[in-house]
Image: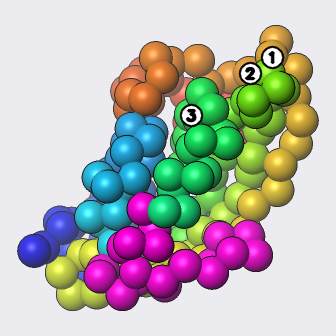
């Protein structure tokens, strides 16, 4: 099943793809998110390697169990053909109530149907005070259209 926009990407279609990924991840629904990836998609997320939708669902289930109140913003960095590079930040709290902002970069490769076949993510976590939070929309919902992106927030 095709997942438009399809490669080769234009600047506009790459931005659409990035926003669609951000919106899906902000639902924190592992099954829904996994549908954007090929059946045999390969990931590197920090030092964890994942292959296939079943492992993606397991990985994301564990991730969002640990990273509570998760809110993500992605921004297009570069694109070429079937590849997109993004930078992102997300805020979350742990079970002890401590807040973090995680910053990272992802490199994506898509198949002809617009499904992501590869995802390579490098991520760093920074502890923040709750008063330093910037991502304040309703939980498990897309970022509102009028909410600032990473560049506007100085991130």
User: In this figure, which residue is indicated by the disc labeled 3?
Assistant: 71
Residue 135 falls within the magenta-colored stretch: no
Residue 87 x %, y %: 63, 58
| Residue on which disc 1 sits | 130
In three-dimensional space, the C-alpha distance between marks 2 and 3, rounded to whole angstroms, equals 10 Å
- Up the image or down, 24 lies above or below 119; here it is above
Name the image quarter holding the N terminus: bottom left
Residue toward you, 2 or 49: 49
Q: Are marks 1 and 2 in contact (CB under 8 Å)?
A: yes
Residue 155 visible here: yes
Circle on res. 133: 2
Tell me the quadrant of the picture where the C terminus can be found.
Answer: top right
Outermost residue, left direction? Answer: 1
Secondary structure under the numbered disc 1 in the rendered image: helix
Report helix, strand or loop for mark 3.
strand
Q: Is residue 117 above or below residue 18?
A: below
Residue drawn at point x = 32 percent, y = 55 percent = 31
* Residue at the image point whose x is 50% and y is 52% from the top: 61
Query: In the figure, 98 relative to 5: above or below?
Result: above
Residue 56 falls in which quadrant of the image? bottom left
Q: Which residues are magenta?
A: 38-57
Residue 9 percent across, percent down from the top left:
31, 75
- Name the residue: 29% across, 52% down: 32
């Amino acid at each position: 099943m095709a997942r438009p926009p399809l490669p080769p990407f234009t600047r506009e279609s790459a931005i659409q793809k990035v926003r669609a990924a951000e919106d899906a991840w902000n639902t924190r629904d592992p099954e829904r998110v996994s549908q954007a990836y090929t059946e045999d998609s390969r990931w590197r997320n920090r030092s964890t390697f994942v292959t296939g939708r079943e492992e993606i669902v397991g990985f994301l289930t564990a991730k969002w169990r640990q990273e509570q109140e998760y809110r993500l913003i992605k921004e297009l960095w570069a694109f070429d053909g079937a590849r997109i590079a993004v930078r992102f930040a997300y805020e979350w709290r742990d079970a002890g109530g401590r807040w973090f902002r995680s910053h990272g970069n992802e490199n994506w490769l898509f198949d002809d149907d617009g499904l992501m076949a590869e995802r390579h993510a490098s991520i760093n976590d920074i502890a923040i005070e709750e008063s330093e939070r910037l991502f304040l929309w309703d939980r498990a919902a897309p970022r509102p259209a009028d909410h600032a992106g990473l560049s506007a927030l100085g991130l």
